[in-house]
Image (cartoon, rainbow, N blue to C red):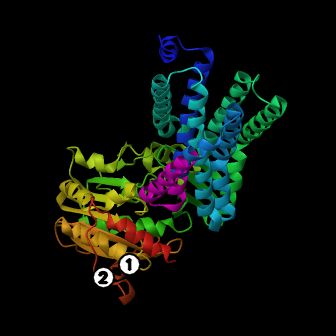
Amino acid sequence: MTGTESISRRGPQPVEIALLASVFVVAACGLVYELSAAALSSYLLGDSVLQFSTVIGTYLFAMGVGSWLSRYFDRQLPAHFLRIELLVALIGGGMPAVLFIANAYVPGAFRLLLYGMVLAVGALVGLEIPLVMRILRRNVALKELVSQVLTFDYLGALAVSIAFPLLLVPQLGMIRTGLLFGLMNAAVALWALWLFRHELRRAGAHAAACALVLLALAAAFVLADRITTLAEDKFYQDRIVFSATSPYQRIVVTHGSAGHRLFLNGNLQFAERDEYRYHEALVHPAMAAHGAPKKVAVLGGGDGMAVREILKYPSVESVTLVELDPNMTRLFTEHETLAALNGGSLKSPKVRIVNTDAFQWLQQPGDMFDVIVVDFPDPTNFAIGKLYTSSFYALLDKRLSASGYAVIQTTSPLIARKSFWTVAQTLESVGLQVAPYHAHVPSFGEWGYIIASHRPYRLPDAGALPKGLRFLSAESLPLLFDFPLDMSRVPADVNRLSNQVLVTTYEQEWGKR
């Protein structure tokens, strides 16, 4: 019997089991750092496809560099492995916190810091597995070694890929998730210190390094809320009264001179001081023109402000609010101050809340609606951009009654002129007639909307608008449909699901500001 056969047939030893368990943890930690960097860049820089592609590409390249560099580690492999684990723990575990703070205090350096840390973590992670394999090679045959290491590596990646969006980020937040896995990396280093205590030189120095890293990460984990507050207070200026991270977005509500303001992933959604202008302009031109709408749907708009305006019409019998994030509808239903902003509209017996993806909801058979209000965030990434495509509007068309109106919030026709008219062109491509209009909302500037229908839009009769409005009147409403030269129509392409040209156009136009 050969030596190799002897090695491969005996049972696993405690050191092997410990190292293979370490491979599982190392793989899980490495993927968490990769996902954290990609998610943060998507939150803060927009265009999720671009950010995920560039971050993951950079990370994988750095892992290749790390694997190549592993050839230069010949002696004291356990000591090198221990040091690398501690470095990964510090840089990877602290990366979300550092990037949050950098975005608030030195935003110009954010990209440089992001990709610098991704390169560093990727290179260190690329060093880990080759070193573990070389340590295990002392006692495990090559055939068994490769299969076992890769199996545990892939299992760790699978576990994290499921837990990261469904459990870790919603429950712990991005900063604590990073720090938790940093602590796990440091724990692997501590475990390696124990396993190889008889081989390590200067074991006392290694023990002190492990203790310091564990202490630093544990302290940061305990103080994670303060770190988040420190960064967000600087970024948002006003006092933060509520913040939460859901699987879909970061929700922040502030209070200051403009009253309450809502931010999703750092983008302003409304300011209490002038939100009535935005929501009156969004809802009433379509609702009043219909005459007597009974069944209304709101897609997006989980803050309930649009629903508040819709419920001002006595003819309305039901409102179906389709909002992806249950945290939004829960917040604006249960939080006393925020529920007061929408007049308690989400508690109305006429309102039915459906927490699901609007695209999927439209694909299901269902009711026809007299008015559909589409109040999604701007198309800053492809996940949102799909809700501005011809595919989406074709589905919308099927749920709109013959005499109904759909109204879509459509970014600024002044700042993002081509983006605005791209939406108009896309609606027309599915056979809908469009009536574009705009209103001035101080918090946003000149803002645009488009009414889409099967019949030409007609201005409402005098007296059709509900009483008590603060912005719109029968006299001012026609003025909204007049476009000056600098906002007039320009040639634009259809935004299709297969190309999503709108996301690129939007990024280019808003990036010029």
- Can residue 238 be seen in this snapshot? no
Q: Are marks 2 and 1 in contact (CB under 8 Å)?
A: yes
Residue 425 at least partly seen: yes
Q: Height in image: 158 above or below 97? A: above
Q: Nearer the viewer, residue 228 or 89?
A: 89
- The stretch of residues the image draws in magenta is 39-66
Residue 474 in percent (x, y) is at 35, 77
Residue at left 36%, top 64%? 283
Position of residue 439 measured from the top left corner of the image (x, y, whole percent): 42, 76
Task: Give the residue number, with chain letter if any, for mark 1.
Answer: 417
Precedes in sequence: disc 2 or disc 1: 1
* Label 2: few (<14), some (14–19) or many (≥20) C-alpha neighbours in 10 Å: few
Q: Position of residue 400 (x, y in %)?
A: 21, 57
Q: Main secondary structure of the magenta part?
A: helix
Label 1: state its secondary structure: helix
Choose between 417 and 274: the one closer to the eye.
Answer: 417
Per the model, the C-alpha gap separating discs 2 and 1 is 8 Å
| Amino acid under disc 2 | Val
Residue at 24%, 62% (x, y): give it: 390
Vertical placement of residue 487 versus 461, above or below: below
Q: Residue at x 46, y 47 (%)?
A: 248
Q: Nearer the viewer, residue 363 or 353?
A: 363
Residue type at mark 1 is Arg
Locate residue 128, reporting x and y percent: 60, 37
> Residue 78: within the magenta?
no
Residue placed most toward the observer, 262 or 413: 413
Residue 496: quarter of image:
bottom left
Q: Would you name the residue on which mark 2 appears?
A: 490
The answer to whether 343 appears left or right of 413 in the picture is: right
Numbered label attached to residue 189 = none
Question: Does the segment drawn in magenta span residue 65?
Answer: yes
